Image (cartoon, rainbow, N blue to C red):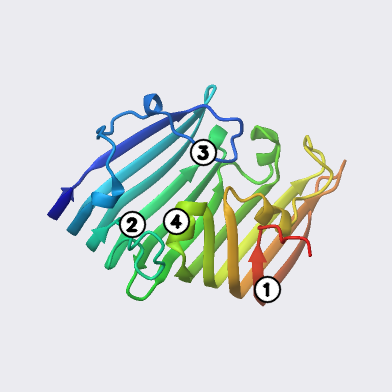
Amino acid sequence: IALRTLVLSSPQIIIDIYGSNTRDTLPDVIHPDSISEVTTVPPINPGKLSISNLVIRDATVLLRHHIDNDIASYELDWLQTSAKDLSTDSTTANNRSRHWFDRAELSAQRFRYTAFDGSRVTTVDSIFYRTSRDIFTVGSLLADPQYEMTEFAYKNRDHVDWTRTSANGISIHGIDLQALAREKTLRIDSLAIANAEMESYKDRNAPQQGNRKVMFHETIQRLPLKADVRTAHLGDITAIYHELPQFETTAGVIKFTGLTGDLHGLSNIASEAE
């Protein structure tokens, strides 16, 4: 199939996925019966697909993941995309520099993730990606609990601690799209965060799933895909931790400001034994 120009204006794509063994990740396989409100197309031999000019304007993509009576949702608003000389033939299959197209730009006004039980919402604003510079930027990120910090551990299903994270000025260089598509592995040359704030509240009187908080390295290990970041720079970080001891009514607070750091070889991919 060869097309000179393909333009999609204001498309709305809604995908519903039913069932999985865990609420932490999306299922590896999406059964055709689980997809609704999206046009079904016959299988295409990728070796014969080429589009000289692809344009998508003002798209909305909504994915809903259903488990029992619980729903998590992923929504991308005002998606804009333009790509030149898109091709999936054998000459581009393993060419990292080309990424199946000669050059492309992608932007979105907002990405919004609502967790199962609705207790947490993550919003990412001002998303932009350009292949010619091999850079992906995000204006801001906010992972926001939907209950007050003193109520969160009681009201959310898993009784986890209240944690709020915000970040601004996020830039990523050197994304290997081939590894992401073919190996489900996110490989990045460099990551930089201009400033961020992390605030957490633990109530020792609330129901507890465990006696300790999940550590940073455990969070990396539990990511829903393999990740490998060569270097990461963190600038102007603020960390605030509140803890209410058992049988007490006043929480203690510890606060760090102006933290910076550089991380190298950040990965959740196990090394082979020597």
- Relative placement, left or right, of 126 versus 197 is left
Q: Secondary structure at mark 2?
A: strand
- Do residues under tags 3 and 2 come within 8 Å of each other at their CB atoms? no
Q: Earlier in the sequence, mark 3 or mark 4?
A: 3
- Few, some or many residues within 10 Å of mark 2 (<14, 14–19, 20+): some
Q: Nearer the viewer, mark 1 or mark 3?
A: 3
Residue at the spot 50% in from the left edge and 49% down from the top edge: 122
Determine the CA span between mark 1 and mark 4. 23 Å
Camera-side residue of 68 and 273: 273
Q: Earlier in the sequence, mark 1 or mark 3?
A: 3
- Few, some or many residues within 10 Å of mark 3 (<14, 14–19, 20+): few
Instruction: Return the residue at label 2.
Output: 109
Instruction: Return the residue at label 1.
Output: 257
Q: Earlier in the sequence, mark 3 or mark 2?
A: 3
What amino acid type is highlighted by mark number 1? Thr
Q: Earlier in the sequence, mark 1 or mark 2?
A: 2
Residue at the spot 81% in from the left edge and 45% down from the top edge: 249
Instruction: Return the residue at label 4.
Output: 124
Residue at the spot 66% in from the left edge and 40% down from the top edge: 152
- Relative placement, left or right, of 178 versus 202 is left
The numbered dot on residue 156 is: none
What amino acid type is highlighted by mark number 2? Gln
Q: Secondary structure at mark 3?
A: loop
Residue 46 placement (x, y as % from top left): 30, 48
- Relative placement, left or right, of 16 versus 58 is right
Count of picture labels: 4
Instruction: Return the residue at label 3.
Output: 28
Determine the CA span between mark 1 and mark 3. 40 Å
